[in-house]
């Protein structure tokens, strides 16, 4: 690899099997939600060991379905973290609910159970109906404590699993522990359908409600309407539902990607281990948190600001100028205009752990098909940048 070759932040691993699966659907005459989607749901549920899985067109739409089924509505509130992508909290607002924010843990990116308990204690007047932990970068939150807190306060747990397939703990796979789990198959995720997601649950009633609300509140699926002997135009609307279904074109890609999930998982872990070894003795880098069953969706490199004469943004821009595709996960929600205007006490000062994590985190490239040369060049550029700015 030449010295100036750019390394993208992410490149999906697409092979001939993926291409043929999509072409097969295109040639089948059935493009929307059908047998491919049904098969994908069954295979995904079997993989994460849940009773039910519902394919949707994004993690965001899956989150809305799960929240609505769990009782999130005007006059209620959910607890989540400001250290997440905006959709986690925005979904509650779409449903008319308030959002109460808990800080993250000091040494991880995970929502802090102590902060969750404080919110319950300080808001006895609020009708809190759900806790929404976010498994950042592949690390699973402290679900043992979160489930205990939820049981004590009789609230639902909706796991945001956008980063955490196939993360696993002693309690089970991410997405199988709470009442619902919501996964993302966006282009940069551990498996992809280009756009799409999956909702998992072991609760039959939640599954039934989400199935109905997923497609306009109909009491019949499109596949059933057009393949069963019963007239296709005969259906009932039981609620003002949404248009959140996944088409078979995407589901076909999801199935072939799912068949390679363990291969992808192994490669990501190998790449992350290389980074960890390379940075182990670098004093301006702190290694990412690595909890049990981490799927290493992201490599969240943390800068030790005390060892540098520059801030995170300067460091990140210089990596980009060197051709390294980086990102930052995440901008805490209290940095955004909408949320600052909505809640007056929603400020960086009240969430010191989230602010500190944000101010020193850079996400490095981490994808299955990265070569050893690519990995070595990323490390070289990080070290050269750090050496230029070493305090």
Image: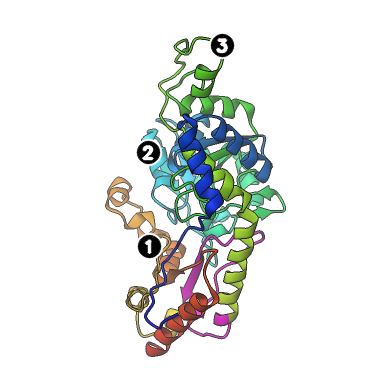
Quarter occupied by the C terminus: bottom left
Look at mark 1 in the image and give the residue it sits on.
349
Q: Which residues are magenta?
A: 278-303
Look at mark 2 in the image and give the residue it sits on.
93
Q: Residue at x 58, y 44 (%)?
A: 255
Eyeballing the image, is 48 above or below 52?
Answer: below
Residue 167 shows up from this direction:
no
What is the CA distance from the residue labelled 2 to the residue labelled 1?
A: 23 Å
Question: Sequence-wise, which precedes: disc 3 or disc 1?
Answer: 3
Tell me: 368 left or right of 317. Answer: right
Question: Sequence-wise, which precedes: disc 2 or disc 1?
Answer: 2
Eyeballing the image, is 152 above or below 281?
Answer: above
Tell me: 122 left or right of 341. Answer: right
Q: Is residue 289 magenta?
A: yes
Residue 196 place in picture, x, y as percent: 46, 43
Quarter occupied by the N terminus: bottom left
What is the CA distance from the residue labelled 2 to the residue labelled 3?
A: 41 Å
């Amino acid at each position: 690899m030449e010295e100036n070759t750019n390394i993208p932040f992410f490149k999906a691993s697409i092979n001939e099997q993926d291409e043929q699966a999509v072409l097969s659907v295109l040639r089948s005459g059935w493009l929307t939600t059908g047998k491919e989607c049904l098969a994908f749901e069954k295979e995904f549920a079997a993989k994460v060991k849940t009773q039910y899985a519902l394919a949707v067109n994004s993690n965001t739409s899956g989150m809305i379905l799960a929240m609505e089924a769990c009782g999130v509505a005007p006059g209620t509130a959910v607890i989540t973290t400001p250290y997440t992508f905006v959709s986690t909290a925005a979904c509650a607002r779409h449903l008319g609910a308030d959002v109460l924010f808990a800080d993250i843990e000091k040494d991880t990116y995970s929502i802090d159970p102590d902060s969750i308990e404080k919110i319950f204690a300080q808001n006895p007047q609020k009708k809190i109906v759900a806790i929404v932990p976010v498994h950042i970068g592949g690390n699973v939150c402290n679900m043992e404590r979160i489930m205990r807190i939820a049981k004590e306060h009789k609230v639902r747990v909706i796991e945001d699993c956008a980063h955490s397939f196939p993360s696993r703990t002693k309690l089970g796979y991410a997405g199988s522990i709470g009442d619902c789990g919501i996964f993302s198959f966006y282009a940069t995720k551990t498996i992809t359908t280009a756009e799409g997601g999956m909702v998992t649950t072991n609760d039959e009633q939640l599954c039934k409600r989400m199935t109905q609300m997923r497609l306009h509140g109909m009491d019949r699926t499109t596949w059933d309407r057009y393949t069963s002997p019963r007239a296709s135009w005969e259906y009932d609307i039981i609620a003002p539902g949404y248009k959140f279904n996944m088409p078979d074109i995407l589901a076909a890609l999801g199935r072939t990607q799912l068949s390679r999930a363990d291969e992808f998982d192994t490669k990501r872990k190998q790449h992350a281990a290389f980074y960890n070894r390379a940075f182990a003795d670098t004093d301006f880098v702190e290694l990412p948190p690595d909890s049990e069953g981490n799927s290493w969706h992201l490599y969240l490199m943390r800068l030790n600001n005390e060892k540098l004469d520059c801030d995170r943004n300067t460091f990140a821009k210089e990596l980009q100028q060197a051709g390294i595709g980086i990102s930052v996960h995440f901008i805490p929600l209290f940095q955004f205009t909408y949320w600052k205007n909505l809640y007056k006490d929603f400020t960086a000062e009240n969430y010191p752990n989230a602010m500190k994590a944000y101010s020193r985190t850079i996400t490095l490239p981490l994808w299955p098909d990265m070569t050893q040369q690519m990995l070595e060049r990323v490390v070289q550029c990080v070290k050269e940048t750090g050496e230029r700015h070493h305090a």
